[in-house]
Image (spheres, helix red, strand yellow):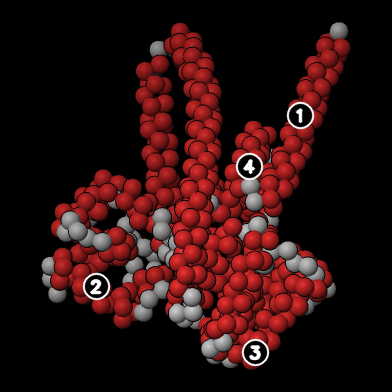
Amino acid sequence: MKKHLLLSILLLFTLKSTAKLTASDHQKQTVDSLLVKSMEFAKRGDLVTYIEIAIKAFHLANAADYDEGKAKSGSYIAEGLMAAGLFKEGLKQLDFIETTNYYKNEIFIQSEVQRLRGRAYGELKLNQQALRAFRLQQGLIKKLTGEKQIKSYQFNYESLSVVFLRMGQLDSMQKYTELQLKNLRVFQEKDAAMRYQIVYENLGRLYIERGDFAKAQQCLDKSLELMKKYKIPVVMNTYGTLGLLEKKRGNFKKAAAFYEESLAKKRAAGSRIGMKNSYRELADFYRTTNLDKGKADRYEMAFSRLNDSLENENRAVVDQVLNLILKLKDQESENKVSKSVKLSIVALVSLVIAITFFVWRARRNRKILGQKELALQETEIVNRELTEQIGENKFNNLIDLAKSNNPEFLTLFTELYPEFIQALKSLDPKIRTTELEFCAMAFLNFSTKNISEYTYVTIRAVQVRKNRLRKKLEIPSDADFNNWMRGLADMSKQTAGLPLSFPE
């Protein structure tokens, strides 16, 4: 009888486990299917639906505890947020991805996170941080193989060339544009025609900037040849760049013809953003060359109308995306509350059991008071250890943010040491954010060399800033700068209970 009972219980648990596994597998397949569907909408340019489906996949992956799904859907959401111009929200999403085991074990997703970080920093005009992210990505790409490695290098080189162009470093831009061309040679021309066309177009513009019109012409001719040979449907700037080349040569009528052709191609392709850019080009061209004032005015009017329309549409998209993100945060909050409720129930049941246990023990002996006191002491020790551990983890995170010159450094620092920040603001109510960050590093006992290395400036620049702050905050010339900052923060140290020394 007992054997039959045990076998029945074992069978019941086996059936439950199998049902749970089947349901979990089904949820994982659904997540993967949603991600494929999301990418289809991305290719169509439907940003809102792309993000909405990615968020659905994210919720389901969390419910199924599907680690790969959480990381991948998180990267889709981050990319969508950045496409909408919500770069800080995108960076927060990347922080979440880095907590998943899939991220920790997969080189490709690590590479993608660095690519997205670099893109966000670049758009936020944090060029040094962008370069650092893209170079970290290069180190990860070296560990990849096959097509993933080649494509990752291509996007990495494209990103670096854009950053160097923004910084006006044309030599570096040329280097990475030519590396793109070299990287593409592993593909058949027909399989990477659009990427080839873009690279030749970019090289054409670069040679125009350098005044080498012959090389510019060769590159742009190659770009046009590829467009015609492979019927590339979306024409971005090649005809416009040819117009710029002829304008530089002084051939205004020929330049006008290319600018007009550029607009016609963009209309045919349905590229409204491209049309807007062409209207701007044509209005400026006809006005600056005094070729046709009437056309200049007409194109200026067309630009204004289309620009207003696109801005309204963009605002609407951003509003929709923000609403989706708010829903995502609400769902996360609900999940946290749900977990808290479950933990509370477990804690309550545990408490009832504990009380019953202590009452039972009290009946057996009269040492209940001593046992309670011992339990309280143990609880106090555990709580103190946990508090110290949390503080230490946050402090280590703060140091990592400082080392990477992360914009979130000052936010976490202010959370940990609010009294120090308040003390500085009391001394100088108009103190700038950059000055607060600098003082925070001194407070953490960073050396001049450390600050120079982590903020990408020279040691001399750090020394100059210290001297300026000495005058501004009236720090005595014989006082050590870091010690003075730490002295100002005595109250902060007592309140926060966190370490103040930065390990050299």
Amino acid at dot 4? Thr
Q: Is residue 257 visible?
A: yes
State the residue position of label 2. Answer: 466
Is the residue 401 above or below the residue 102 in the image?
below
Give residue 53's position: percent from left, percent from top: 65, 40
Q: Are marks 1 and 2 in contact (CB under 8 Å)?
A: no
Q: CA distance from mark 2 to mark 4?
A: 50 Å
Mark 1 and mark 3 lie on one chain; the one further toward the N terminus is: 1
> Is residue 496 found left or right of 176 in the rendered image?
left
Q: Disc 1 and disc 3: Cα gap in Å?
A: 61 Å
Marks 4 and 3 sit apart, C-alpha to C-alpha, by 43 Å
The reply to whether callout 3 and callout 2 are in contact (CB within 8 Å) is: no
Disc 3 is placed on an element classified as: helix
The relative height of residue 160 versus residue 215 in the rendered view (above or below) is above
- Which residue is at the front of the view, 232 or 398? 232
Which of marks 1 and 4 precedes in the sequence? 1
Q: Mark 4 or mark 3: name the one nearer the start of the chain.
A: 4
Specify whether 24 is left or right of 173. Answer: right
Q: Residue 480: x and y, percent? A: 21, 71
- First in residue order: circle 1 vs circle 2: 1
Q: Eyeballing the image, is 217 above or below 386?
A: below
Q: Secondary structure at mark 2?
A: helix
The spot of residue 68 in percent (x, y) is: 69, 46
How many angstroms separate mark 1 from mark 2 (CA)? Answer: 61 Å
From the viewer's perspective, is the residue at label 4 or at label 3 nearer? 3
At label 2, which amino acid type do we have?
Answer: Lys
